[in-house]
């Protein structure tokens, strides 16, 4: 399979690459690194990516920024950071990518545990995660030619210790468990699912 | 209680007004009608509304547009209609309104059943509904002074027959049941809940 991984050199992405690289052709994409570059906040940049890479069988996105801060001080502009990047960036990858994906292909996006299990300072990310989980559920019933779509929603991951203080009582999840959720989505047959990794 | 109802003359809003007007001071807000006007897609317009209305005890929003159409043809611009109106419009009402609401006040937003129960052509609205349900869950743990927040998520309502063909097998919900979900949110004591009306 030809698998595009957007965010391939990131904390999660590099483990997904390792888990899938045997027996597959991996196309590594990053904002600045990788085989190809993309600015996911820019739909034109996404279209250019697909024009360059051509047809593919699976796409994994492990990328997207969002605002982290107190609700009391949160503004429309703060919220838009995540809407433009983690939310619409990943949705546009699907809206545009659906015209380049092979039959029976799959999209796997990254949401997170905060949609269902919020923390202080995380209201914007919770919103975006909830949006992505609902999007894959809805998109799954309209994608054609057997194309599937799922989301992986990890809790705080063990290789992001800087976030631990903001996740009291959360047990950081191993990179192996997180990576295997992406493998389950890409190599499995389910669609419209939001896999939580807790 | 002084209760602001945004969308007060709409299909749902007028029933919420009827259900809450006894014993309360209702401030009716619309895009073109009502005691005050607001463009919820414009944060400045929302701020102006609160400056005019002053302190309040409860706010109900039954408003917001979104795009309805096939995923295959959906674009970033289509998606932005709902992000700017139904999603960020209602979120900005909370982000700005939290600075004008009385202690122990409440916000009640409108999501919908499509976040959990998608239909063909509804991917954008599903996404927005899922986002709103997650937002109220997250905002509830940060709002101060006992301020509460919930969302009401109705299935297709009986006074919107034009939508019935797009909701095969859905049993339209009565306006009474829908209005009572808002009453439950405003006069009850729960917070962070997404009340589905099915």
Image (cartoon, coloured by chain):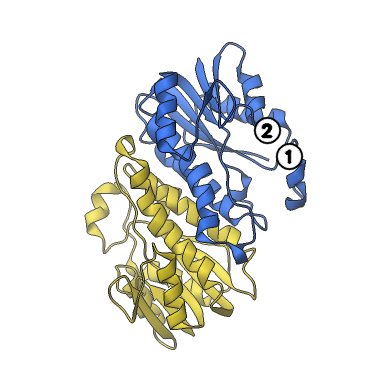
Chain colours: A blue, B yellow
**In the drawing, what numbered circle is on residue A11?**
2
Q: Is residue A188 above or below residue A70?
A: above
Residue A154 placement (x, y as % from top left): 64, 39
Residue A61 image-quadrant placement: top right
Furthest-front residue in view?
A32
Residue B13 placement (x, y as % from top left): 35, 71
Number of on-image labels: 2
Which residue is depicted at the point 36% across and 67% down?
A: B39
The answer to whether the residue labelled 2 contacts the one labelled 1, judged by CB atoms less than 8 Å apart, is yes
In the image: residue B33, left or right of residue A174: left
The reply to whether residue B146 is visible in this rendering is: yes
Separation (CA) of disc 2 from disc 1:
8 Å
Residue B32 placement (x, y as % from top left): 28, 72
Is tag 2's residue or tag 1's residue first in the polypeptide sequence? 2
Residue A68 placement (x, y as % from top left): 63, 53
In the image: residue B184, left or right of residue B114: right
> What residue sits right under mark 1 in the picture?
A160
């Amino acid at each position: 399979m030809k698998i595009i991984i957007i965010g391939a050199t990131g904390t999660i992405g590099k483990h997904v690459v390792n888990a899938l690289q045997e027996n597959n052709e991996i196309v590594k994409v990053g904002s600045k690194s990788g085989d190809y570059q993309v600015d996911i906040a820019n739909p034109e940049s996404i279209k250019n990516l697909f024009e360059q890479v051509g047809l593919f069988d699976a796409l994994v996105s492990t990328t997207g920024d969002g605002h982290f801060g107190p609700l009391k001080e949160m503004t429309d502009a703060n919220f838009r950071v995540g809407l433009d990047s983690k939310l619409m960036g990943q949705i546009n990858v699907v809206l545009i990518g659906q015209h380049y994906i092979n039959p029976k292909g799959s999209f796997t996006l990254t949401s997170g545990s905060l949609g269902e299990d919020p923390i202080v300072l995380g209201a914007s990310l919770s919103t975006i995660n909830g949006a992505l989980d609902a999007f894959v559920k809805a998109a799954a019933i309209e994608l054609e030619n057997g194309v599937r779509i799922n989301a992986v929603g990890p809790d705080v991951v063990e290789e992001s210790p800087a976030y631990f203080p903001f996740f009291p009582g959360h047990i950081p999840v191993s990179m192996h468990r997180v990576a295997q959720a992406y493998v389950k989505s890409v190599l499995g047959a389910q669609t419209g699912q939001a896999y939580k990794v807790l």
